[in-house]
């Protein structure tokens, strides 16, 4: 337990230091955001030191509930804890029957649900409150996990996904009713990004894996499974898997890139981006860089139009070509940049898996096959850990739900992208500032990364949360925060704005 206390103390200190930097570089509201982030992190890690899963789930739920009682900070503290806390989970069984998978993320959702019962006012949906994207993505994931099984398992999967995705989405949508809550959530995402990056840098340079200690304590994993590249530890992050953690951190980078208007100076904004970029560097996962760059281009296109792509794409291609060329001649640099022999081995596995997947998809193109049926045809791809690694998210969806499932899943991301880009015109003259460009950046980032990462729960949930934030920016960013927390109709505000212009 003393070792866990030591680890928790270091993580809490690094979180406090990272968020303190954010506090002095951004808007006034960041002081409250950074204080909540630090206290919630310290409290959660203290509870995790007890190493009892039920105490951990209950304790993190209580901490979330305490801070989420204030509706303005509810969405923000929830996504902060989801991004930054270590992956610890268990499967609840009663009488030998598997009921539901519980995790630290689930406990955050339950705390958010409990806190939402204390809020006043009602949510008023508007045109740009896009529900389709979330429901389409969750429907495909539910079909994949429930197909070709018993009725009880279908019900279990449906209930689990309803709790895991739909409930937090509805509550989050209800909480983001004004500019104060929108800005707070964006600040919490940036805080999570700089905090996780600071911890990743500490892990990498000190060669000291941090988050794995908690999973070992709870018995979730028995081996930290860490790797060295170029003399540095490959930081695994809260997901305890570098590519998965890097994918989430890339979404934080894109959110930070789109949040320039929240920073006092351009230098402060660039420093925050630099810290998160260093975190991605320490994780040494190419998918993180891909997501960060693609998402940033999406933000630029949203801000400046398609000409931004023609300007920045050649620059990025030249930079990538230079990095790749240098990696061919410098082995140390190749290790750090992700072009090492280990990385090449991973790429070869991906290529073999994709080739086999295409062959299987051609045999069952419409709705695919069950997970068990697909795995039986890919046994030769089973790795030393005893798993078949479906690292290509789009390919896995096609295998398990066919082209129909892939089209539904992709349409959810595409429609969110379209909704964000067209809706931005509504708020160009409002107080959302650069945040109006977040939606397109997040969708482009997520869409670019899924060929290289699986549909991991944390990645999907963070993506859905940022979709919800993007919709709220378009729909509610012009609404001032009111003490009662009650809804304000967009039409009434537009009339008032028009009246002021006429009067002027």
Image (spheres, rainbow, N blue to C red):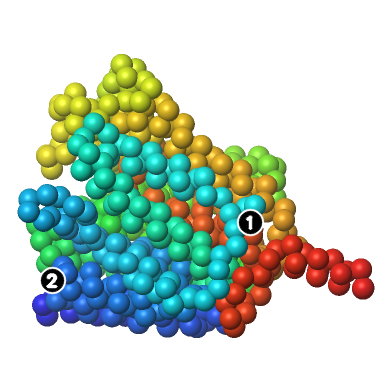
Q: Quadrant of the C terminus?
A: bottom right
Examine the image and state in which quarter residue 59 appears.
bottom left
The residue at the point 48 percent across, 76 percent down is: 119
Residue 498 is labelled as none
**Residue 313 appearing in the image:** yes
**Tag 2, which secondary structure?**
loop
Q: Nearer the viewer, residue 176 or 304?
A: 176
Is residue 443 rendered to the left or right of residue 400? right
First in sequence, mark 1 or 2: give its number: 2
The circle on residue 52 is 2
* Foreground residue among 319 and 190: 190
In this rendering, is residue 24 above or below 296? below
Secondary structure beneath dot 1 equals loop
Give the farthest residue toward the front: 151
**Residue 281 point in image, percent of width and height:** 37, 56
Residue at position x 30%, y 77% in the image = 62
* Placement of 278 over or under 62, stated as above or below: above
Relative to residue 166, is residue 389 drawn left or right?
A: left
For the residues carrying marks 1 and 2, which lies nearer the camera in this image? 1
Which residue carries the number 1 mark?
126
Q: Residue furthest top?
A: 363
Looking at the rendering, which quadrant does residue 177 occupy? bottom right
**Of the pair 446 and 367, the residue shown nearer to us:** 367
């Amino acid at each position: 337990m003393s070792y866990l206390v030591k680890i928790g103390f270091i993580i809490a200190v690094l979180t406090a230091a990272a968020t303190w930097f954010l506090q002095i570089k951004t808007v006034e509201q960041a002081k409250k955001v950074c204080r909540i982030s630090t206290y919630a992190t310290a409290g959660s890690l203290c509870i995790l030191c007890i190493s009892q899963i039920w105490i951990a789930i209950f304790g993190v739920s209580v901490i979330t509930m305490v801070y989420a009682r204030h509706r303005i900070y509810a969405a923000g503290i929830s996504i902060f804890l989801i991004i930054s806390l270590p992956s610890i989970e268990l499967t609840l069984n009663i009488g030998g029957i598997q009921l539901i998978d519980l995790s630290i993320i689930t406990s955050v959702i339950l705390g958010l649900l409990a806190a939402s019962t204390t809020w006043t006012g009602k949510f008023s949906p508007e045109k740009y409150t896009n529900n389709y994207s979330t429901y389409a993505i969750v429907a495909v994931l539910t079909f994949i996990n429930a197909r070709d099984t018993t009725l009880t398992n279908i019900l279990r999967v449906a209930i689990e996904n309803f709790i895991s995705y739909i409930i937090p989405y509805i509550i989050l949508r209800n909480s983001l009713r004004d500019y104060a809550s929108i800005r707070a959530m964006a600040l919490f995402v940036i805080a999570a990004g700089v905090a996780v990056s600071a911890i990743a840098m500490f892990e990498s340079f000190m060669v000291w894996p941090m988050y794995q200690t908690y999973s070992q304590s709870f018995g979730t994993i028995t081996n930290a499974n860490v790797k060295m590249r170029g003399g540095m530890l490959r930081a695994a992050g809260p997901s305890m898997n570098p590519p998965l953690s890097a994918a989430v951190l890339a979404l934080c980078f894109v959110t930070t890139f789109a949040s320039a208007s929240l920073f006092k100076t351009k230098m402060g904004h660039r420093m925050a981006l630099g810290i998160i970029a260093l975190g991605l560097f320490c994780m040494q996962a190419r998918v993180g860089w891909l997501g960060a760059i693609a998402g940033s281009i999406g933000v630029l296109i949203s801000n400046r139009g398609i000409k931004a792509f023609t300007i920045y794409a050649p620059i990025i291609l030249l930079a990538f070509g230079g990095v790749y060329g240098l990696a061919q001649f410098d082995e140390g640099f190749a290790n750090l940049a992700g072009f090492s022999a280990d990385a090449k081995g991973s790429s070869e596995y991906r290529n073999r898996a994709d080739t086999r997947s295409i062959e299987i998809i051609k045999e069952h193109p419409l709705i695919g096959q069950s997970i068990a049926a697909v795995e039986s045809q890919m046994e030769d791809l089973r790795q030393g850990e005893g798993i078949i690694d479906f690292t290509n998210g789009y390919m896995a969806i096609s295998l398990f739900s066919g082209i129909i499932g892939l089209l539904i899943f992709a349409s959810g991301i595409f429609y969110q992208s379209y909704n964000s880009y067209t809706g931005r015109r509504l708020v160009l003259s409002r107080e959302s500032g650069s945040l109006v460009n977040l939606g397109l950046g997040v969708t482009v980032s997520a869409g670019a990364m899924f060929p290289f990462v699986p549909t991991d729960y944390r990645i999907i949930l963070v993506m859905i949360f940022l979709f919800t934030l993007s919709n709220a920016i378009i729909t509610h960013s012009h609404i001032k925060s009111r003490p009662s927390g009650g809804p304000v109709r967009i039409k009434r505000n537009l009339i008032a704005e028009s009246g002021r212009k006429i009067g002027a």
